[in-house]
C-alpha cells in the first residue's frame, strides 16, 4: 500500500489559514493545534513573547450556527497555571454568537458562512453574492487628490 501526502479536511485547512491571517507569524505568534475530545471541533493555543511577557490565547473553531464554548472551556481547563491573555472563537459568517460570553473575542470566517440556515463555502462563485461587505463611501469633501493638479 502506497500512501501519498496527508489527507486533511478542507475545512480545517481554511480554518488554519484564517487563524494565521489574524495571528501572523511575522508578529511572533505561534499556532499550536491541540487535540479536542469533541468530534468536529478544532482547538488551538496561540502564543507569543511581547516585551518580555508571554501572551497565551486559547482559540476554538466552530462550524455550528449557534456555536458552543464547551470545546474552548475544555481547552482552557488544560491550560491550568498559565495566565491567559484572552479567549477567542472562529465561527462562520452569519453564526448566532449572541449566547457567547462577552469575554470571548469572536472572529468570523471569510471562507464559510450560513445562507438560509445552511453552511456554505463562500468562495464558490454562486455564494459570494450572499455576503457583501457594507462599505461606507468616502464623502467627496474629505477626498484628497493623490497627485496635485498641474497648471501650466
Image (cartoon, rainbow, N blue to C red):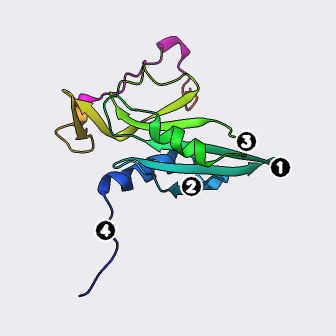
Instruction: Give whichever of 37, 61 is nearer the camera.
Output: 37
Answer with the quarter of the image where residue 93 lies.
top left
Of the numbered discs 3 and 1, the one sitting upstream in the chain is: 1
Q: Which mark is residue 83?
A: 3
User: What residue is pinned by disc 2?
Assistant: 31
Which is in the foreground here, disc 2 or disc 3?
3
Badge 2 marks a residue whose secondary structure is strand
In the drawing, does residue 116 fall left or right of residue 36? left
* Residue at image mark 4: 7
What residue is pinned by disc 1? Answer: 52
Q: Residue at x 30, y 56 (%)?
A: 10
Task: Give the spatial CA distance, label 4 vs label 1.
Answer: 38 Å
Evaluate whether residue 104 shows in this view: yes
- Asked whether the beta carbons under mark 3 and mark 4 sit within 8 Å of each other, the answer is no
- 84 lies left or right of 117: right
The reply to whether the C-beta atoms of the residues labelled 3 and 1 are less than 8 Å apart is: no
Disc 3 is placed on an element classified as loop
Amino acid at each position: 500500500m502506497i500512501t501519498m501526502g496527508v489527507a486533511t479536511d478542507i475545512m480545517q485547512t481554511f480554518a488554519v489559514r484564517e487563524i494565521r491571517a489574524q495571528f501572523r507569524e511575522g508578529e511572533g505568534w505561534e499556532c499550536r493545534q491541540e487535540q479536542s475530545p469533541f468530534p468536529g471541533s478544532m482547538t488551538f493555543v496561540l502564543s507569543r513573547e511581547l516585551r518580555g511577557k508571554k501572551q497565551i490565547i486559547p482559540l476554538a473553531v466552530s462550524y455550528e450556527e449557534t456555536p458552543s464554548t464547551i470545546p474552548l472551556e475544555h481547552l482552557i481547563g488544560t491550560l491550568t497555571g498559565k495566565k491567559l491573555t484572552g479567549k477567542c472563537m472562529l465561527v462562520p459568517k452569519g453564526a448566532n454568537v449572541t449566547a457567547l460570553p462577552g469575554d470571548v473575542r469572536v472572529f468570523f470566517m471569510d471562507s464559510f458562512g450560513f445562507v438560509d440556515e445552511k453552511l456554505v463555502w463562500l468562495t464558490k462563485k454562486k455564494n459570494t453574492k450572499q455576503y457583501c461587505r457594507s462599505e461606507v463611501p468616502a464623502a467627496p469633501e474629505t477626498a484628497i487628490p493623490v497627485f496635485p493638479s498641474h497648471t501650466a
